Amino acid sequence: MKSYHANLGAGIDGIVLRTHDRPAPGPHQILVHVRAVSLNFRELSILRGYYPLPIKPDVILASDGAGEVVAVGQNVTRAKVGDRIAAAIFPHWIDGPFGLEYSAQLGGSLDGMLTEYALLPEDAAVPIPDHLSFEEAATLPCAAVTAWNALCGSAPLLPGQTVLILGSGGVSLFALQLAKLFGARVIATTSSADKAERLKALGADEAINYKTTPDWHVAVRALTGGRGADVVVEVGGAGTLEKSIKATAAEGQISVVGALAKETSTINAGAISATVVKLHRIAVGSRAQFIGMNRALAMHRLKPVIDRVFPFGDAIKAFRYYEAGSYFGKIVISNG
Amino acid sequence: MKSYHANLGAGIDGIVLRTHDRPAPGPHQILVHVRAVSLNFRELSILRGYYPLPIKPDVILASDGAGEVVAVGQNVTRAKVGDRIAAAIFPHWIDGPFGLEYSAQLGGSLDGMLTEYALLPEDAAVPIPDHLSFEEAATLPCAAVTAWNALCGSAPLLPGQTVLILGSGGVSLFALQLAKLFGARVIATTSSADKAERLKALGADEAINYKTTPDWHVAVRALTGGRGADVVVEVGGAGTLEKSIKATAAEGQISVVGALAKETSTINAGAISATVVKLHRIAVGSRAQFIGMNRALAMHRLKPVIDRVFPFGDAIKAFRYYEAGSYFGKIVISNG
Amino acid sequence: MKSYHANLGAGIDGIVLRTHDRPAPGPHQILVHVRAVSLNFRELSILRGYYPLPIKPDVILASDGAGEVVAVGQNVTRAKVGDRIAAAIFPHWIDGPFGLEYSAQLGGSLDGMLTEYALLPEDAAVPIPDHLSFEEAATLPCAAVTAWNALCGSAPLLPGQTVLILGSGGVSLFALQLAKLFGARVIATTSSADKAERLKALGADEAINYKTTPDWHVAVRALTGGRGADVVVEVGGAGTLEKSIKATAAEGQISVVGALAKETSTINAGAISATVVKLHRIAVGSRAQFIGMNRALAMHRLKPVIDRVFPFGDAIKAFRYYEAGSYFGKIVISNG
Amino acid sequence: MKSYHANLGAGIDGIVLRTHDRPAPGPHQILVHVRAVSLNFRELSILRGYYPLPIKPDVILASDGAGEVVAVGQNVTRAKVGDRIAAAIFPHWIDGPFGLEYSAQLGGSLDGMLTEYALLPEDAAVPIPDHLSFEEAATLPCAAVTAWNALCGSAPLLPGQTVLILGSGGVSLFALQLAKLFGARVIATTSSADKAERLKALGADEAINYKTTPDWHVAVRALTGGRGADVVVEVGGAGTLEKSIKATAAEGQISVVGALAKETSTINAGAISATVVKLHRIAVGSRAQFIGMNRALAMHRLKPVIDRVFPFGDAIKAFRYYEAGSYFGKIVISNG
């Protein structure tokens, strides 16, 4: 079996393809024939060497993958041979709030999914909705679960409430599609009329061009009768947090999805104390959240937005395409 | 101005139409020109004399009404002249869980809405969504708010979850329509193929005929892959509670809406201890819940189901029609 | 190594002591030298053959045990050799609400703790507070965790609130001791002046003799200025549930701890619909709740109440003593 | 009757004592003979002219007061003549989360309590625990309710958890005293050994001198075995927020109590995204929270810390003393 390994700090050039023996699962372990993988910004920051958590040397890349269970060890109850599964990024995080004891993660401190066969703890196995292909299912573990957690992991999102999403990255697109399942209204910020159209085609009720409307927080207030957004999926980080706070309703929820940019910046501390809001830093989500989200995807037959699929042998091309940044939807590597 | 008053225990025959001077609002009070009223089972139990809470002698009937604000007293901030409002049943219950100090209720310990002009505490005023007529808005305060509270007042209802409703009474129909806004799947029990069709036309995903399928809790389990319903809106009382418990998923929520039937019955206490579920007795809902629900109704332009509208002068005919029980949707008295 | 095995339905007479080879832990498994075990009513109902969940044939008895980790398998992160641990009854239930996928339990569908060496999934390992002996720690997994979950697993328990406990069984005593850590007031029902004294010595603010005061729910109302208890730890089942409901404050919480008595009885369904309360059937608690409770025990150096300790060789005597029912506190079997 | 009025922006020098007729309460209003008032930083920022919310011109000063009800208007149900009450700062905020419609506040957009007789909406009336004098009760509405909300308004605070308080201002001292009622451990930061002693005398488990230990967030981690504080009552604003975040446990709660300092400063946005925490900006608290807190105070007979009491005639001296800043506990103006 073959696997792509990271050489920390060496960037995409440092990725190495290596051959191994196929492992046998022990108690509480499963072996998965990986059929598809998707890319996230965390992969780039790991390759560039500034990911904030510990990374296993020579780690097999990629947190996000889906495939078929081909062998199970003793005492395994969460999966059986033949199951179509996606892997949960934090296999120890079963349910409840995040905790440090759950922080071991695939494609980080644990080996990841950019491999032909992945040996996983059974807890990582999350069944895939029937209507999704492996390519589609492989887009879910990081971006979709983060979006789901951002929408309903703290306060519940109710029909008639307003969700603000920023831009059209992976988490934002899932947050848009998922928020519509909750019966919520979605306001999106974006940088072009073209993207605004694509966001509206996915269900956005309003799109604000933040280039022509730099005070987009004022526009959000105007679009909500002065009330502000009930939930903000804040992916922009330093550059947007202060405006996001100003765009939020009283007691509204700002779900902060970590920006992994290298540069740092500051916000006015007064912006926090001037507004009665809640901020919650989101760390993907638990296995139980993944399962709950899948129930919603299955019922509504929701399809992820995929920009492009690369074959397993072209994984490095996929990384370069992703790094270039001109995509709308997820980049997938298929091992079909 | 004219008002219909109850003569407790004297039934519909005891209803009296009386003429009064139009009152002037004091501080924190508003005067509302009532334009429509809807009927609920509580009115029948008040007239029959077995409503469980204290009733003001000679009370003006009906908790549910909508109209236009025609005068406001000093210090009023929650309404102004010209506002289209519905009245909250428990005017003191602004937000948070129910409490005994909030138990004063319109058409009960306080005068109700079956009158031409109602003098109300400003806290009772809830703005009506623009897309609703007064007749439609008058259906909301008791049945719709109860349904909303039953769905999301305790645990949040998530897309992809399953809601079980029993029959086609006022609360059940609103629970069905509202559950669809949450992206939930709805299973309804009903007594005829005709009603099953009407329930499906309103959005029900499945309808179970409880006459031909008396073990409908088994059918609910089968329809949910063995899992059970996540939320049950339990309006049936003694006759159904035990089966409802058996139809509920682990840690699922049974929202018990009070059956006001005179007869009582028993349930097997073991049914409660055999299943890991939550029961929550629901008491309509708070003003904040009413406002939150209206936001959802407005966004989705949801329309209540009205069976029939009677003119103000035919109020007694409306009560008799309601008592006969052959309706599907709300009975409204209009004062056009 | 020796283990006590159940012969389902054969009662205490059917318990068999058997000798095995000591097993070696595989991936995600640990081997624990068990130093103490405590008994719960579930053991009796398993031996009598009417426990409601599936039991492994020839199961090693007892859910509750504590000991020292003597070996760990590959990939184990939750424990290391030398750790003093107690076992969580539901090893798969890490955090969040209970679910059927977590229902495998020690001393039930999985082998239990009445053995010299227990092979456990690492998820079962919960560190013991330093101030507790193995005998003391062995009392926690079932009764104490259930009490903790009953107090704060649904609604938070706040200082100044009132908790009602029924009798002096294992869960009730822990609920009493734990409720005092929350700053709550505790009212206990009991059957004798002697037990009333012991309950007060443990911190109960009030004790009601339910023999001389059969309408103890009225007494609870009187002791709370008419308000009722905020949390009821309902262990009595059919015989007490109706009165417990009547003793509960509006929106109060009744935590139903399953009575495992063979006989069943009924409650008036009207009692539920007449009172705005929440019932929550409690199923012990998660690993995270166990850990959270231990933090409280450690800070306050709280000591469980132990009635009597038997040596490992006298385990059958311990069961007979427990069955006789004349105890106040936990029965422990030590393998010191 | 006499009242002290603010002259916005004119500081303490601009305070004017004026004489009025005693008003008569209308419907839903009460008249209170004010017996004591306490001072908060909001009063200084109003006088200095930079309070962030709208202030009524010539407003009667002070949000915090307690007294006796001497007259009630029609339809008043929440108070009767002779009741000892404290005033809730936001009289419209009955329960649930804060909302803009509840933002009218005593001593701000509404007249305040530094008067002999206050005309209040009945919703403002909160009964005083029996064990507290008017002087003691007058310290509660702003600082104590804020502390209570900070501790349990979002996540529940559990026994065994750790609360971090910053300094010895009014909110911090109440947070310390209240946290001990929850069975929590309290770590306090302070600037001197003398204050550290006083904090420990009030129940603090640990005190960190932030002058000698400028990296106090590291010290908090060390004192909690690396875990961090579960709840931080963040009163320091810009100067401390970043360190507070770093001192907080995963999924811990930072309750941000608004610093009303004129100067602003910045925090590193990366500090928020680097840690999985929740921030909640706290706006005092609701009437229901005030009542719930009083239940805890009453049960535990907790006494507020009062630094000094001034007579009504010396109100301006009280303001000057408060402005000077050398106090430990609340400053009270008595009209005994």
Image (spheres, coloured by chain):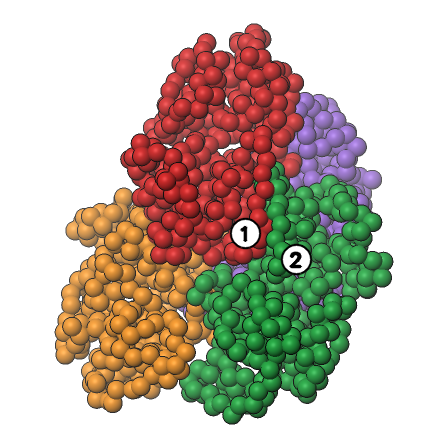
Chain colours: A red, B orange, C purple, D green
Residue at screen point 46% across, 32% down: A143
Asked if residue D118 shows in the view, the reply is yes
Amino acid type for the residue under numbered disc 1: Ala
* Left or right position of A336 against A259: left
Task: Find out whether the residues at labels 1 and 2 contact each other: C-beta distance under 8 Å.
Answer: no
Q: Quadrant of residue A317?
A: top left
Q: Secondary structure at mark 2?
A: loop
Q: Which mark is residue D235?
A: 2
Residue at screen point 37% across, 23% down: A307
Q: Secondary structure at mark 1?
A: helix
The extreme bottom residue here reads D21
Q: Nearer the viewer, residue D158 or D265?
A: D265
**Callout 2 environment at 10 Å: few (<14), some (14 to 19), or many (20+)?**
many
**Callout 1 environment at 10 Å: few (<14), some (14 to 19), or many (20+)?**
some
Q: Quadrant of residue B56?
A: bottom left
Residue at screen point 52% across, 78% down: D58
- Nearer to us of marks 1 and 2 is 1
Amino acid type for the residue under numbered disc 2: Val
Q: Nearer the viewer, residue C325 or C13?
A: C325
Q: Position of residue A160 (x, y in %)?
A: 35, 52
Above or below, A22 relative to B101: above
Q: Position of residue D181 (x, y in %)?
A: 70, 63
Residue at screen point 20% across, 82% down: B13
Residue position for label 1: A271
Q: Position of residue B15 (x, y in %)?
A: 22, 83
